[in-house]
Image: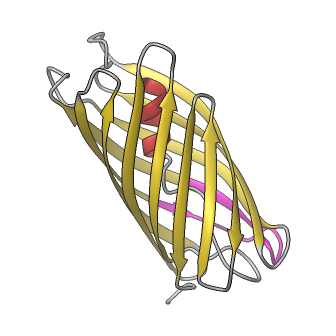
Amino acid sequence: MKKLILALAAFALSGVAVAGPSWTYVDLGYVRADSGDNDADAYGIAGSFGFGELFHVNAVWVDGTDSDDDDFDSYRIGAGLHPAVTDDTDLVLEIGYATISSDDFSNDPSWVDLTLGVRSMITDRFELNAAIVTAVGDDDIGGADGFTEVGINIGGQYFFNDAISINVVGSDEVVKFGVRWSFGDLM
């Protein structure tokens, strides 16, 4: 389940538009986790708002069911910087806070995650992205005192036009498929 948590926390990572990644969008997605002992399926919505050509804020909400038929929901809020490395590539530095609740948990674990990554428009219609995400939490899903997890997310996004795209992001045993509507940076 920890792998699913990292995927949910990183749900908003992928991206984009023409001439550099866009940071203002709405994304609808499906997440599938297969960790061997506990599988899960989830649906979610993510949104991001880019401003000042350097900053972004985002939010994610996910609702799902694991292989034991336990329902869960999670949310994440984040803020970060995305300095341009080239005209088509942005460095991503982000901090986020997330929590997950389920009838299966005696409490609602929460965590802070730090992301270091890159988003790059390979062509006018295709973006590649990758990130290292470190999550540090107050309670382990198994009941121990705290946890630290590190994951690598790798994804891609194909644009049908400047606004509509499909994307996939994977991390170890987790994969997320999404449909995105990008608005371009509004400010």
Position of residue 15 measured from the top left corner of the image (x, y, whole percent): 62, 66
Relative to the observer, which residue lies in front, 3 or 98? 3
- Residue 184 rendering spot, x and y as whole percentages: 57, 85
| Percent x, y of residue 61 | 32, 54
> Which quadrant of the structure image shows residue 145?
top left
Percent across and percent down for residue 162 are 66, 86
The quarter of the displayed image where residue 152 is located: top right
Q: How many marks?
A: 0
Residue 119 lies, with reference to residue 48, above or below; the image says: above
Q: Is 106 left or right of 120, judged from the image as shown?
A: left
Q: Residue at x 80, y 74 (%)?
A: 88
Foreground residue among 103 and 134:
103
| Stretch of the chain drawn in magenta | 79-93
Residue 105 placement, left or right of 45: left
**Residue 42 in the image: above or below residue 80:** above
Task: Please tell me whether residue 87 belongs to the stretch shown in magenta.
Answer: yes
Which residue is drawn at the image coordinates 35% and 35% (left, top)? 111
* Residue at (59, 55) in percent of width and height: 93
